[in-house]
Amino acid sequence: MILKLIRWIRGYVVFAVSGRFPERFINLLNMNGIVYWDLLPENGGYHGTMLLSDYRSIRRLARRAGVRLRVKKRRGLVFFIRKYRRRKGLFIGAVAAALIIAFLSQFIWVIRFEGASGLSESELRKALSDNGFHTGVLKSSVDFDSLERNMLLKFPEIRWLSVNTMNNVATVEIREKHRAPEPPDQSKPCNIKAAFDGVITKTTVYNGKLETQKGSAVSKNQLLVSAVIEGTNEDLTYVRSDAEIFADVRVNKEFNIPITNYNITGADNYIEKSKANFLWFSFPWQLAVPQNGVEVSNFYTYALSGGEINLPLGKSTSHRFYLEKNEKKLTNNEAKELLRTRAALFECFCEPKSRVKSRDVKYLISDNNATLKINYILNKDIGVEQELVVKR
Amino acid sequence: MKKSKREKGKSDLSMELLGSQPIVEFTGNRRVLVEGSTGVLRYEDEIVSINTRSMVISFHGRGLTLKCISPTAVIIDGFITETEFIN
């Protein structure tokens, strides 16, 4: 490919050789170190290709070999320019294009991120923009050292950051910090106390001395596992207690909802505004008059993509939805269903590790409110750590 | 192993002879490289004759083309059916 391009730039001709001794001509070309290619036999001679500069110097050799040379095709930049020399607009356009490309090459048009898996790309873009690094910035005006330093200060999660530019593309390489989970402070002794009143059903002690037993009733704040362990020689050891103490606990929960509900819904009709983005400029192509009222808007940007790179040519669209407030009175069944859902959500997300042993449900309805009262008996881990201060 | 006088004489002679001989290397019957050529004597679709210092080598076949020519070597591509050595 490169060889073909070089040949095209230098110019080449396809020539035909005919005469009595065309082989002699080939030998003379070889002896004079003249390069030619695609030499193929033809009726009573050959045709081949050689560079324009070489072709100008082989007339003498052709005379010596007694052959006749004839040009069949001319190819290359020289001939191309000669062909279009009267079409000045073409040359002006080519020069203008070259100048525009040279000018636009001085700017950053694409910013890419690599390795930022745990960070928001839009936040990173905003932070870069605050530091003067955005799409369309002049490359020479950016202080990359200061930019990298400011980004590291802004994002403590980033361990290393480097901004590399290649042509118009800036690649921001990011390495995030790996944070090890903080281990519990094993040096401080602690007791385990009861967080609720209940009846112990299961005890598993990993460290410490159990102060209760299965079947015992315990009250809130009662010591369950002690951090003080007495040795055989009456010496005391202080440990960090670790245990799972399960107990049946009575929990009363009340859920309330108003009978008259207000729903906020997005209106079906919305206002769309679009802008075409090109380089630094954006041209609105859809105009809309904003309405009064509560609104929610979303914003999309589409860019023309060339391979993996988004080009600085695209479209931004924003949608404005105007919200409507609707009043709705719940029926008895709807209110019940809604309260049941809330209770189910409570069991799922607020008590995920507890087992429901029984629930006593009462549904009450008044003029404006619906209430669901549930008396649960939950089997749950009631132990909570409480640090022990040892004075020596 | 020691070489006898007769064997030594033989190898010297062959080296002397080989010095002026062309080296011909075939790749199947589709390509041939001739090293030590001094010129092309005939170049047609069905026959290519190469001159060397000690002989003329003719290759007969179909669709024969000179792939590459330098002052001392020639590569011929095509379907070679016959080779002729003329001293």
Image: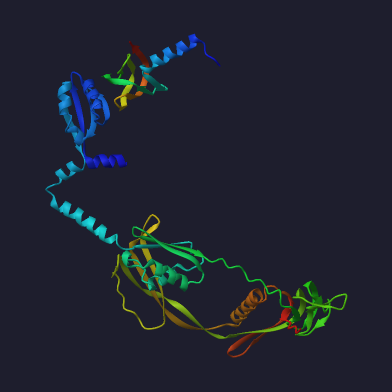
Residue A275 locus on image (x, y percent) = 31, 69
In the image, is A204 to the left or to the right of A372? right
Relative to A159, residue A381 above or below: below
Q: Is residue A384 visible?
A: yes
Residue depicted at 19% across the width and 25% down the height: A17
Closer to us: A130 or A259: A130
Q: Is residue A359 visible?
A: no
Q: Residue A166's quadrant in the figure? A: bottom left
Residue A103 image offset from top left, x and y in percent? 26, 61
Q: What residue is at 65 percent from the left and 87 percent from the top?
A: A364
Quadrant of the drawing holding the N terminus of chain A: top left
Q: Position of residue A54 (x, y in %)?
A: 20, 33
Furthest residue in direction bottom, as rendered? A367
Quadrant occupied by the C terminus of chain A: bottom right
* Quarter of image, res A186: bottom right
Q: Is residue A162 left or right of residue B66?
A: right
Q: Is residue A302 left or right of residue A390?
A: left
The answer to which of B52 and A97 lies nearer the viewer is B52
